[in-house]
Image (cartoon, coloured by chain):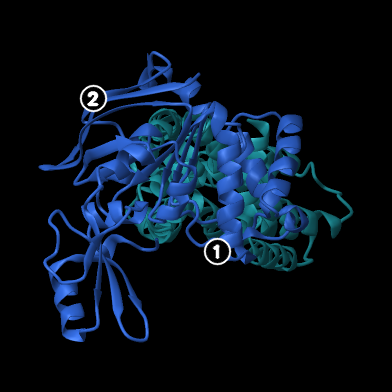
Chain colours: A blue, B cyan
Amino acid sequence: MNILEIKNLTKTYGNKNANDNITVTLENGLYGLLGPNGAGKTTFMKQITTLIEPSKGEIIYNGKNIKELNEEYRAVLGYLPQEFGVYKNFSAQQFLQYVAALKGMNKKQAKNKIKELLELVGLYEVRNKAVDKFSGGMKRRVGIAQALLNDPKILVLDEPTAGLDPQERARFRNLLSQISKDKIIILSTHIISDIESIAKETIMIKDGAMLMKGNHKEILSGMEGKVYCIKTSNENEVMEIQNSYKVVNIQRSIDHVELRVVSDKMPRYENVEIIEPKFEDVYMFYFDLENTREV
Amino acid sequence: MGSLIKLELKKMLFKKRILIIWMGILFLSFISIRAFSMEETYADLFSKSYGLVPFMGILMFMIFSGAYTLEYNSNMSGIIKTTKNGRKSIVIAKSIASVIGASILNLSIFFTLCLSAFTKFKFAGLDIPLKNLWYFGNSESDITVIQMILIMTFTIVLGSFFFAQIGLFLSSISNSAAIPFVFGGLIMGLPYILEGFVKNMGLGKYLGATPLWTMMSCQLIRYKIPMSMIGIFIVIFIGAMTILPKLTYDSFMKNN
């Protein structure tokens, strides 16, 4: 069992707290990290991956501070940043060989693992092609493969499915589900359906602080009675609702319009009913519309 | 570590533009030696080896300048620093790979000149003392041509080591490869550019304490540079080799 205890984690830049007193304990399983741009997700992940040091607080892995564990901790870490470039003169295989060397794997071990991962991410056939010539989705898959090279116990993925097509995303979700049994996976994404389908728990971050943490049932239970369906045939009313409420979805039929609305209070319209909350409603409820890239 | 050095070397050396310029310089080196008398040609070899220094500098700083800026600009530094060997080991690996890379480039240019000169006389006359060559006219040196070649082979590696640390440090503190290329090039090239000016001021002997002249040690012999200047360079060398890798590591770790 892997246990990652994050205690009072605070990162301050000037007088702004990028992360503010986050305390959370993570065990084996996949954790979805949800929050709008600038909420502090990347700072949070960079501290877990030792890329930046906390201003306050500490991170304990299996009872030991990760700062003291140093190399020992990084040996069990896998990380895929939001964006990363590639070396123009490296093929996919050479790129993975390079990362394997960085991860301290011996040649034989690396060779087998690289083959296995290239097959897993569907790039074995093009392993000798320059990564620079790959499409965005293919590069992303190389990134995923490099993160998995050392069979990490802690896997931190910053928007790993960005740029992947639906088929690749489904494949990637299945892969994460499969490997999350014996490792801690922290997955940051705006694609709510990715988290909804595979995360054991979701951590929501807003303004650098942890807004909530829980499994889907717990998070959705907090939304009971806050999601409404408003039916109207009046276009002026549609405009009015959009201006007054957070509208998750607008569905147009021949004779009427259905608006899915999240609100603390019941909207005062003629044809309103409370409906079952979905995960995307949670995001819309707590965060602003412009931060939802895809649901 | 071996794989890391090998792949770092590949990353910095096997780029199309480096290979094209390298091949161009090798060709230039070969044709620049012309068939005069044996003494004239061998003197020409040392003259040209120093004359081609700007090309060595361009090539060297082309490989050094991108060593860290490439990682910063591609955000690979994030991936690298979260790996087991992604901190001290990578800095060491980059350093060793740069020294090897620069030595290969510089020695290949120097040896091409040698080859071009020696093949013209079927490798005869390698035991001619330098004092017989016009390039070393006033040196009165009894060192032979082949001995000078061996000394230069050693000092070129030594110089490559020195310039690699400077180039890597400049790369580690920059976000653009242009900065280490220009400033590194200047550090290396100033003694070359200002040679006439410095000599006119009567300060020529101080050029012997510069890394460029130590690298191209034929200059030390040619101008009978006193041992004290070489001693000063050794102090500079040891100081730089102690401080620069540490500063490079610190800059790399700070850059997020």
Circle 2 packing at 10 Å, graded few (<14), some (14-19), many (20+), is some
Task: Specify whether A102 is left or right of A118.
Answer: left
Can you tell which mark lies on residue A57? Answer: 2
Which image quadrant: the N terminus of chain B? top right
Do the residues at pointers 2 and 1 share their chain? Answer: yes
Task: Specify whether A186 is left or right of B147.
Answer: left
Q: Considering the numbered disc 1 on the image, is that residue within a helix, a strand or a loop?
A: helix
Q: The numbered mark 2 sits on a residue in which chain? A: A
Nearer the observer, B55 or B13 = B13
Residue beneath the point at 73% across and 30% down? A109
Compared to residue B184, the image places residue A253 above or below, namely below
Nearer the observer, B203 or B167 = B167
Q: The numbered mark 1 sits on a residue in which chain? A: A
Nearer the observer, B130 or A292 = A292
Residue A122 appears at what percent x and percent y?
70, 54
Which residue position holds label 1? A136
Nearer the observer, A173 or A96 = A173
Circle 1 packing at 10 Å, graded few (<14), some (14-19), many (20+), is some
Compared to residue B37, the image places residue A72 above or below, namely above
Say which label, 2 or 1, has the lower sequence index. 2
Compared to residue B50, the image places residue A249 above or below, namely below
Which image quadrant: the C terminus of chain B? top left
Q: Is residue B190 visible?
A: no
Residue B218 appears at what percent x and percent y?
59, 46
Three-letter amino acid code at the position of disc 1: Gly
Residue beneath the point at 54% across and 41% down? B159
Three-letter amino acid code at the position of disc 2: Gly
